């Protein structure tokens, strides 16, 4: 009887532990899905708001093509998220989302649609002020939901740890008599934990696929890397983008909006729309940056906001790079083992309406590599507070692989090894000049997560 009791305990313990781990894994995945739904809700609002702002600033109807109010997707996403939060028992979550839905409807009815009908009306300023108030209220509701989801996730992890410890303690008492069953339990436990990590990784990967895609310039092979300091939302103020303006001309940019999180992502999204639109009828990067600076100052309400931008135009036939840099620091050309800086040609965007920029011309040869990175790379800090710095970046670049994606991966790994983890938004893009038949497509996600979808790399 005693042996039978030991055997029953040995069998039951692992089975109970695996079921508990599976239950906790499922709960974590459902909470991650709810966070993804909340991000999608914010992206929908930010997409509409950015389109309306761009239309008001330029009267260009193309800003309204991707996210034009009214958007029924917002109501659908909000109702789905309410149901998910209610099913998970998230305190005050459904109420906050319902308030976001009501605020969004008010924003569309009283702000977006009137401004779209008559952007120059006497009430335009008052309507935009009301829109900012409504958006701020929605952001507060979203922050409340995020906090509730974080609390629920912490509780699930604490419960998971307690259950694991309890199960291990029970099994440890009989492990000497039933070693095989104890080993089976350990394998089952490890498998369940691996499923938890794998499923959460899948959720994060799905979130990353919701980025805006670009198209690499002709005769350019590209690699990229992006990491956000706001890990729970995977959004930040760093932006990467590239597009073609013809068979031989391609544009690419890297930008860094001041601040972090959703607000910085909103400014980065505005920059992406605006710079693409301004470059559509221009061929001089300096002229595009000067016009964008005026648009930025006339659109962004907070005078303390600014943006660092590097805008390049690559002419494939002549292998010539023309660029203008608004205070962008980490920019280099590697020619073999020689590394040359691409210095700024003007101040950061957002200081003064009369700012001007210069365009620099750089001749490139086959195999030359252009590296651009935001300050999250150079300012990565060690435990002693020491920054990675430009000298280390140049040394890494000099010895790094020629493949652009491998180069970006090496830089990210070096920054993380140096600092122990990303503590600021970081974006990196590398471009290599290749023969006409060697420009391998390298898809990347233009940042931020919060805005419209364009064509994939081809």
Image: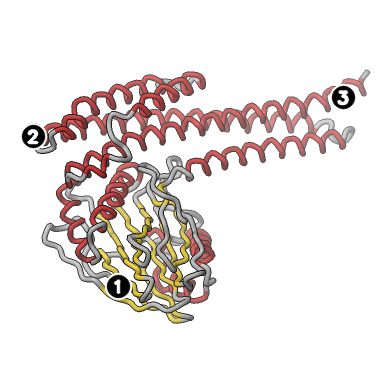
Looking at the rendered structure, the secondary structure element under dot 3 is helix
Which circle marks residue 38 in the picture?
none
Nearer mark to the viewer, of 1 and 3:
1
Q: Which residue is painted at 31% across and 51% down in the image?
A: 272
**Whole-percent x, y for residue 363 in the image:** 35, 78
Instruction: Give the position of the N terminus as an image quadrant.
Output: top right
Q: Earlier in the sequence, mark 1 or mark 3?
A: 3
First-in-chain label (2 vs 3): 3
Quadrant for residue 247, please give it. Answer: bottom left
Q: Give SS at disc 1.
A: loop
Q: Position of residue 5 (x, y in %)?
A: 88, 20
Q: Secondary structure at mark 2?
A: loop
Measure the C-alpha gap from mark 1 to mark 3: 74 Å
The residue that appears at 41% across and 22% down in the rendered structure is 79
Q: Position of residue 390 (x, y in %)?
A: 39, 70
| Residue annotated with mark 2 | 121
The residue that disc 1 covers is 343
- Number of numbered discs overlaid on the protein picture: 3
**Which residue sits at x=68%, y=32%?**
164
Work out whether residue 418 can be spotted: no
Side of 429 where 123 appears, left or right: left
Q: Which residue is mark 3?
A: 6
Query: Would residue 394 be visible to someone looking at this image?
Result: yes
Tell us which disc is closer to us: 1 or 2: 2
Q: Is residue 323 above or below residue 122?
A: below
Can you give x and y, in whole percent of width and height, for residue 368 in the image? 44, 76
Mark-to-mark CA distance, 2 and 3: 82 Å
């Amino acid at each position: 009887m005693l042996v039978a009791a030991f055997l029953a305990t040995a069998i039951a313990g692992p089975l109970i532990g695996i079921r508990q781990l599976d239950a906790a894994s499922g709960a974590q995945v459902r909470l991650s899905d709810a966070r993804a739904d909340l991000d999608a809700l914010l992206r929908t609002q930010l997409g509409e708001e950015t389109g309306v702002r761009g239309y008001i600033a330029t009267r260009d109807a193309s800003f309204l093509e991707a996210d034009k109010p009214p958007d029924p997707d917002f109501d659908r996403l909000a109702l789905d998220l309410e149901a998910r939060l209610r099913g998970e028992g998230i305190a005050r979550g459904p109420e906050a989302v319902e308030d976001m839905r009501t605020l969004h409807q008010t924003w569309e009815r009283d702000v977006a649609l009137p401004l779209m009908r008559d952007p120059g009306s006497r009430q335009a300023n008052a309507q935009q002020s009301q829109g900012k108030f409504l958006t701020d209220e929605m952001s507060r509701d979203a922050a409340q939901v995020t906090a509730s989801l974080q609390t629920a996730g912490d509780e699930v992890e604490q419960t998971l740890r307690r259950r694991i410890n309890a199960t291990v303690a029970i099994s440890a008492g009989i492990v000497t008599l039933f070693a095989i069953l104890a080993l089976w339990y350990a394998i089952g436990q490890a498998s369940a934990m691996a499923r938890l990590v794998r499923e959460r990784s899948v959720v994060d990967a799905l979130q990353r696929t919701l980025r805006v895609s670009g198209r690499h310039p002709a005769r350019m092979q590209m690699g990229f890397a992006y990491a956000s300091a706001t890990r729970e939302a995977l959004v930040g103020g760093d932006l990467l983008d590239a597009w073609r303006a013809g068979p031989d001309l391609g544009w690419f940019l890297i930008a860094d909006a001041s601040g972090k999180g959703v607000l910085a992502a909103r400014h980065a999204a505005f920059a992406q729309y605006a710079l693409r639109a301004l470059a559509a009828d221009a061929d001089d990067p300096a002229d595009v940056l000067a016009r964008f600076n005026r648009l930025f100052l006339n659109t962004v309400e907070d005078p303390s906001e600014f943006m660092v931008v590097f805008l390049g135009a690559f002419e494939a036939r002549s292998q010539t790079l023309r660029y203008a840099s608004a205070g962008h620091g980490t920019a280099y050309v590697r020619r073999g083992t020689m590394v040359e800086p691409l210095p700024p040609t003007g101040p950061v965007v957002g200081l003064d309406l009369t700012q001007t920029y210069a365009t620099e011309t750089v001749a490139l040869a086959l195999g030359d590599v252009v590296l651009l990175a935001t300050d999250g790379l150079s300012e990565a800090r060690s435990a002693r507070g020491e920054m990675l710095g430009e000298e280390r970046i140049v040394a890494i670049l000099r010895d790094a692989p020629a493949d652009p994606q491998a180069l970006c991966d090496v830089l990210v790994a070096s920054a993380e090894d140096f600092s122990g983890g990303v503590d600021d938004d970081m974006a990196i893009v590398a471009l290599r000049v290749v023969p006409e038949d060697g420009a391998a497509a390298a898809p990347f996600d233009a940042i931020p997560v919060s805005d419209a979808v364009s064509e994939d790399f081809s």
